[in-house]
Image: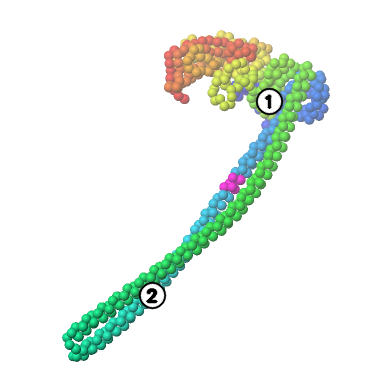
Amino acid sequence: MANDSQQVFGDYAPSPDPRYITSPLSGLVRLGTTATHAAGCSSTFCTDYSKTDVVKALQGADVVFVCLGTVIVYIIYIIYIICTICIICIIYIICIIYIIYIICIIYIIYIICIIYIICIICIIYIIYIICTICIICIIYIICIICIICIICTIYIICTICIICIIYIICIICIIYIICIIYIIYITCIIYIIYTIYIICIIYIISIIYIIYISCIIYIILIICIIYIICIICIICTICAIYIIYIICIICIIYIICIICAIYIIYIICIIYIIYTICIICIIYIICIICAIYIIYIICIICIIYIIYIICIIYIISDKPVVLLLINGGPLNIGWATANPRVVAILECFYPAQAAGDAILSSLANLGVGSVPAARLPFTWPSRDSQIPPMVNYSMAGRTYWYFDGEPAFPYGYGLSYTTFRYADFTCDITVMAGEGLWCSVIVYNTGPYDADEVSQAYMSWHNTSLPVPRIQLVGFTRTFIASGRSAVYEFTLDPKKMAVWTDNDGWAVLPGAMNIYVGGQQPNQRTSVGSNVEQRQFQIIGTKILGKY
């Protein structure tokens, strides 16, 4: 429906009455209130698509409307969306479970590490305590042994001193007696005897001194032997204590290894149990996904079955077919465009609650603004080989700017119940770089109906060494023209539309020849809308740097 406040490139249904919302099929139902419906079908919903009932429903019909997107398709599409959402939710749940599983494993490993570190610290502490006690005991034993050795040495020295004192006393007594005897003898014996006596005394004293020295050496020897024996005993005691200490450490380490092995086996068992539970959950969720996928396949089968019914309509019925497309993007409808029995194709996109009324107005031409005038807002490829791969981010082959080949329906394509003719297209022959180009054209409604016309202006570069679009839309307008009347379309081409991109200066208007086209469609397209396209050429004088924007 025409609406001046709406986008001029499409047709729109009127705003619904705010008191109620109409059914999407309400307008279509009014197309034939006396039509015979198949068994099990009401005006808005069908539950039986049997071949026999469909054939009966076609009897007496003037035109067959095939709607790719009826209530059943909507329901199946909703089921498909629900299944997709369920699959996404289940995948999300699986991811959450897997993340929880990973977190549990990490947490368990963390706990194991903490326990292991605590065990190591406790073992080190216990070993430290044991070593400290052993060292204290060894030091205590060494101190006791040293004290005993010192006491024994003192005792031996005291004994030796007493012996020496007794020995000296004896010597003194002997000397005294000898002196007494000597004195007496002096009085009795001559000088020679005195001399011999002196020699004997010296000899005796030497013998006593030698005996004294021998006793001292003997006592020292005895002390050294006792000291060496004590040292050997201490070393043996220390070695025995160290060997006992090493044996205790080995036993403790062995016990700790056994405990750690048991604990690790326990943790492995816990992890295995958790892993098994997770696997069971994943298997269960996979089963649910399989069930949902089966539902999804059933929905696809239902869609295929509906298409099969459409094919039955198409094959058995000899009536003209009007194809209503309810979709969001290009479809492969080559089977429809190639068959003359499909007399009309109406692109409805995704309509709202007043879709039926809008379709009724367009098909039945009910009043002013009902004649279709919308234009296609994208290029409709004729086959999938014309679509570049998704992994290729180049603009080559994309949009009408760089599209190669012949599309099924070009950008800006749209039919009308009436016809238009463009004439008297004039524009400036030359324009200075950076200035606008004035253009004017007269549009005639040469058909039997009052209608809107979408006039489109395109531009192309005549010769340029820089990469530019094949063709570019530079302006359009939507104008209501009564039958047999005309309207003037004037516009000024913005200098930014003439600019090309340069690496150094950004956008720039360069000198050269340009082509400009005005009509109800793209120039030189094979799939034509029935109106002509006017063409002119102009020259750009000079250069204008517009910069980067």
Q: Residue at x 71, y 25 (%)?
A: 68
Residue at the outermost top position:
424
Q: Which residue is mark 1?
A: 326
Q: Residue at x 81, y 29 (%)?
A: 40
Count of all numbered marks drawn on residues in the image = 2
Q: Secondary structure at mark 1?
A: loop
Give the residue type at disc 2: Cys
Q: Which residues are magenta?
A: 100-106
Give the CA separation, mark 1 to mark 2.
Answer: 118 Å
Q: Residue at x 48, y 62 (%)?
A: 243
Q: Which residue is mark 2?
A: 152
Horizontal and vertical percent for residue 404?
58, 17
Q: Residue at x 63, y 40 (%)?
A: 92
In the image, 62: left or right of 377? right
In the image, 318: left or right of 189? right
In the image, 289: left or right of 117? right
